[in-house]
Image (cartoon, grey):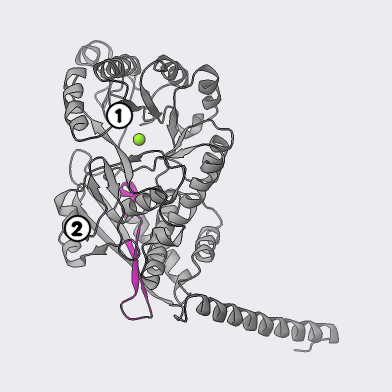
Amino acid sequence: MTMNRRGLLRSMAGAGMLSLTCAREQRAQEAAGQAARGMPAPKIKDIQVIETQPAGARLTVVKILTDQDGLYGYGCATFTQRAELVRVAVERYLKPLLLGRTTDRIEDIWQTAYDSSYWKNGPVLNNAISGVDEALWDIKGRQAGMPVYQLVGGKCREAVECFASARGGDPKAVIEASKEIVKRGFRYIRVGGGGEGGPGGSAAARASNVLHNGPLYDRGASYRRTLKLLEECSGAFGAEIQWATDMHERYDPRQAVQFCKAVEKLNIFFIEDPLSPEDLAYFRQIREQCTTPLAMGELFNSPHEWQPLIQERLIDYIRCHVSQVGGFTPARKIALLGENFGVKTCWHAPGDLSPVGHMANVTLDIVSYNFGIQEWSPFNPRVLEVFHGCAEMKDPYLWVSEKPGWGIEVDEKAAAKFPFTDSGARSGLNGGWGDLRLADGTVIKQ
Ligand code: MG
């Protein structure tokens, strides 16, 4: 093959550029080594997926091993509704992309993983990226001998106040459950009236006009019951106890506007997910009608979803699921964006989140000036058998670990004792939720 003069010059210039780039990278790496007190930058030697189901939810944790003996980290990649796909995304997509890279460039690795697939912002990939991202933060903390919160500015509060959830078949039972919660020192209580976790239908309605045999949701009944519940709870306690409910995106947008307006006079700390991500424009209407505090975000995958709500101050609490948005790195940016617009944080923290994910939440809470409140689900004893060093609850405060990294060790032998299963009421759906329908058979969001 022949090459003309211009081509030859171009190729020589290319080679020169390459060596210049390599030299520059080497110098940057040396500088980073000095900044890290002479500690050599670890390289990613292996990326493993730990799957365990000690109590209900299928928990997925990514473990990154480095080329330095005993230096590794854990990240939460739990997406229990599509757990098996997260494993594939980590093993078949991220692992080949990232093996051999230095662990000290967390931002660079996050952007690489996010952009490499080109089509992005999906829950499977975001959770897989979160597993890697949080494992890298864990490694950096272990290297530094510091908890992750020290790497992002240190504490701006001592511990993290949480809300508790009270459940019961009727307002009387919920009030009784709430009295016990108040005795434990909690000031914020979330209650459900069929919007959260319940069908919202009644036996009478089913007998007369229901045109299907599946799970039923009656929006009108749920609306009336939840409003009554909040009125009774609010009336049964003093002003120092505040209330919330989760509408779980199940109402019609018009009903959601009306509901938020109807509870404005009550002692509400927020209404959670009044609208689905498809109906975000209705937040403007709610804001025009009332001052009821609003929380939203557990279904969000993309900046396109949270940015407008925060920038237009259409919500009061951003409630993203940290692994769902891609891990600690993007969640920290969301918190900082919120701080600039007066929006507080309330990270999603149900049972289908690993203790590593909970620690990432608490770390964000403890370093973010605009922390609002934290959701908290107690750890099942079997979860504590697998995960050692979890965040500690001393009612009503959650305490971050003071150990390096996230401060959590995973007992992999114990984890293996609880393999994934597909059992329970939704068995056969592999984590899916099935359908929820109105009386006439219309499927709705759940
Ligand atoms: Mg919720």
Pick whichever, 39 or 71, lies toward us: 39
| Separation of residues labelled 2 and 1 (CA atoms) | 29 Å
Nearest to the observer: residue 12 or residue 8: 12
- Determine whether the beta carbon of the residue marked 1 sits less than 8 angstroms from the nearest atom of ligand 1: yes
Pinpoint residue 116: horizontal percent, then vertical percent: 54, 62
Number of residue marks: 2
**What secondary structure is marked by label 2?**
loop
The local crowd at label 1, few if under 14, some if 14 to 19, many if 20 or more residues have their Cα within 10 Å, is many
* Residue 78 in view, yes or no: no
Q: Position of residue 409 (x, y in %)?
A: 25, 64
SS for callout 1: loop
Dots 2 and 1: beta carbons under 8 Å? no
Check the picture and name the quadrant holding the C terminus. Answer: top left
Report the amino acid beneath label 1: Glu
400 above or below 372?
below
Residue identifier under label 1: 196
Q: Residues within 10 Å of mark 2 (few under 14, many from 20)?
A: some
Task: Answer left or right for 236 relative to 21.
Answer: left
Measured along the vertical axis of the image, is residue 6 above or below residue 266? Answer: below
Magenta region: 62-83
Residue behind mark 2: 419
Please report the residue visible at 19 percent of the width from the left and 35 percent of the height from the top: 184
- How far across and down, in percent of the image, does residue 271 sit? 39, 27
Q: Residue at x 49, y 65 (%)?
A: 106
Is 169 magenta? The answer is no
